[in-house]
């Protein structure tokens, strides 16, 4: 078998068995935004949504970005863009 093929298969199996290994640890900034957003802080929800939308400090996730934009709007920040 081709060595590249075996390497690819082993990477895919590892990613399926240990999906968290592929993700970088959340920065302190991200943790702070999450904590503040969970408390209902609209600006932090908005900033966090921009991070998810752009993939800055977190794995890019458009669905999560939209959820956070909506939460920011519900909490009173309807800017629709991160203010970071």
Image (tube, rainbow, N blue to C red):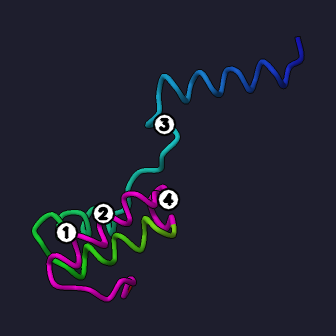
> Closer to the camera: disc 3 or disc 1?
1
In the rendered structure, the answer to whether residue 43 lies left or right of residue 18 reads left
Q: CA distance from mark 3 to mark 1?
A: 25 Å
Residue position marked by numbered label 2 in the rendering: 67
Q: Quadrant of residue 50?
A: bottom left
Q: CA distance from mark 4 to mark 3?
A: 16 Å
Q: Earlier in the sequence, mark 3 or mark 2?
A: 3
The circle on residue 60 is: 4
Query: Is residue 65 magenta-colored?
Result: yes
Residue in the picture at 46% in, 57% down? 61
Q: Earlier in the sequence, mark 1 or mark 2?
A: 1
Label 2 element class:
helix
Label 1 element class:
helix
In the depicted structure, whether residue 3 falls above or below residue 39: above
Q: Quadrant of residue 62?
A: bottom left
Residue 57 x %, y %? 45, 64
User: Looking at this view, is 60 or 1 the one in front?
Assistant: 60
Residue 84 x %, y %? 38, 85
Residue 56 x %, y %? 49, 68
> Closer to the camera: disc 2 or disc 4?
2
In the rendered structure, the answer to whether residue 58 lies left or right of residue 42 reads right
Label 4 element class:
loop
In the rendered structure, the answer to whether residue 9 lies left or right of residue 77 reads right
Q: CA distance from mark 1 to mark 4?
A: 18 Å
> Closer to the camera: disc 1 or disc 2?
2
Q: CA distance from mark 2 to mark 4?
A: 13 Å
Residue position marked by numbered label 3 in the rendering: 21
Residue position marked by numbered label 1 in the rendering: 37
Circle 1 residues within 10 Å: few <14, some 14–19, many ≥20: many
Residue in the picture at 36% in, 66% down? 66
Q: Which residues are magenta?
A: 55-83
> Closer to the camera: disc 4 or disc 3?
4
């Amino acid at each position: 078998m081709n060595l590249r093929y075996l390497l690819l298969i082993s990477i895919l199996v590892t990613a399926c068995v240990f999906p968290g290994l592929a993700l970088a640890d959340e920065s302190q900034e991200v943790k702070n935004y999450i904590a503040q957003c969970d408390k209902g802080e609209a600006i932090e929800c908005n900033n966090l949504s921009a991070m998810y939308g752009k993939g800055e400090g977190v794995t890019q996730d458009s669905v999560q970005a939209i959820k956070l934009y909506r939460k920011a709007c519900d909490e009173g920040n309807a800017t629709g863009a991160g203010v970071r």
